[in-house]
C-alpha cells in the first residue's frame, strides 16, 4: 500500500510539473506575441514617419520649384525693365544731342 501511495504521489508530482511547464510555455508564447506586436507597432510607426518625410520632401520640392519660377520671372522682368530704361536713356541722349546745337547747351 505504501508503494502504491508513493507511485500515486510521484504521478501527481509529474503532472504538476507538466502543468507548470505548460504554464511556462504559455507565458513564453504570450511574451513572444507581445514582442511581435511591439515590433509591428514600431514598423508601423517607422512607415508613418517615412511617409511624413516623403510628404515634407515633396512640399519642399514644390516650394523650391515655385521659388525658381519666381526667380525666372524676376529675371525676365528686370531684363525688360533694363531694356526700357536703356531705350529711354538712349532717346534722351539723342534728344539732347539734337537739341544741343539749337539751344547752345552743347558747344562743339
Image: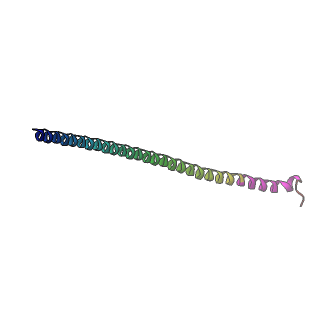
Q: Is residue 104 left or right of residue 67?
A: right
Q: Is residue 106 left or right of residue 91?
A: right
Name the outermost residue toward the left: 1
Return the residue nearer the eye: 82 or 41.
41
Q: Residue at x 17, y 42 (%)?
A: 10
Query: Picture coordinates of residue 99 (x, y %)?
Result: 83, 53
Q: Quadrant of the N terminus?
A: top left
Name the outermost residue toward the front: 2
Instruction: Check residue 97 for magenta coloring.
Output: yes
Query: Picture coordinates of residue 68 (x, y %)?
Result: 56, 52
Question: Which range is magenta?
Answer: 86-103
Image: 13 above or below 90: above
Return the residue nearer the eye: 17 or 78.
17
Q: Is residue 10 left or right of residue 34?
A: left
Q: Residue at x 18, y 41 (%)?
A: 15
Q: Main secondary structure of the magenta part?
A: helix
Amino acid at each position: 500500500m505504501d508503494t502504491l501511495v508513493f507511485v500515486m504521489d510521484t504521478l501527481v508530482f509529474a503532472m504538476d510539473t507538466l502543468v507548470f511547464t505548460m504554464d511556462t510555455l504559455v507565458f513564453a508564447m504570450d511574451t513572444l506575441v507581445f514582442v511581435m506586436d511591439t515590433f509591428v507597432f514600431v514598423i508601423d510607426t517607422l512607415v508613418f514617419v517615412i511617409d511624413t518625410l516623403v510628404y515634407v520632401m515633396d512640399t519642399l520640392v514644390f516650394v523650391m520649384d515655385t521659388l525658381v519660377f519666381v526667380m525666372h520671372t524676376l529675371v525676365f522682368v528686370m531684363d525688360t525693365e533694363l531694356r526700357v530704361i536703356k531705350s529711354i536713356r538712349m532717346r534722351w541722349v539723342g534728344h539732347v544731342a539734337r537739341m544741343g546745337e539749337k539751344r547752345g547747351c552743347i558747344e562743339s
